[in-house]
Amino acid sequence: MKKKLLILGSLGLTMCLNAQVTTFVGTDALVTVKNGTLVYSGGGWQNATAGKVANEGDIMVVGSTTDIFDIANGAEFRLKYIDAENYGQLYISNIAQEGKIAGKVIKEFRADENHSD
């Protein structure tokens, strides 16, 4: 019985420690978040050079004062537009804007190509 409790306690501690790991998109990686999907990061977010995120759903990054949100030069973080009711959204909470958030997020939008008045 004591061994089982020790194993369960160790597993629970491991899960708690892993929950604090920063989300990392590596070099040349492609991450696609489909419409209706929520990706939750309980820490910071980093995109390495040439790492790509195509977000049609929702990404929520809830960090702390020590976490960062960093999109490297050459990386791509794109909020995709599907239609007026379906589009990629990014929510960042508890990460300071000054010195902790860096990089470029590309937001697609609808443009009238053949608009005539």
Image (tube, rainbow, N blue to C red):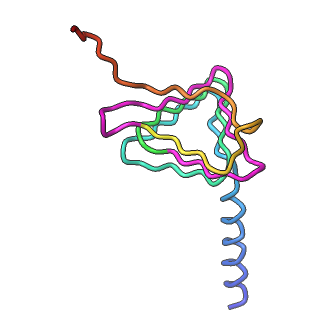
Q: Residue at x 51, y 49 (%)?
A: 39
Which residues make up the magenta segment? 59-87
Image: 114 above or below 9: above
Image position, residue 2 (x, y; %): 72, 89
Rendered residue at 55%/30% (across/down): 77
Name the residue located 68 percent from the left edge and 27 percent from the top edge: 72
Which quadrant: the N terminus?
A: bottom right
Q: Is residue 17 above or below residue 52?
A: below
Closer-to-camera residue (111/80): 111
Q: Position of residue 10 (x, y in %)?
A: 72, 73
Residue reaching furthest front?
117
The quadrant of the image that shows the C terminus is top left
Q: Residue at x 67, y 71 (%)?
A: 11
Q: Is residue 91 left or right of residue 4?
A: left
Asked if the stretch drawn in magenta spans residue 82, the answer is yes
Residue 53 image offset from top left, x and y in percent: 53, 33
User: Residue 78 vs residue 36: left or right?
Assistant: right
Q: Where residue 101 sits in the image (x, y, percent)?
A: 69, 36
**Number of callouts in the render?**
0
- Which of the 4 image quadrants contains residue 49? top right
Residue found at the far bottom of this picture: 1
Note whether 106 is above or below 86 in the view shown.
above
77 inside magenta stretch: yes
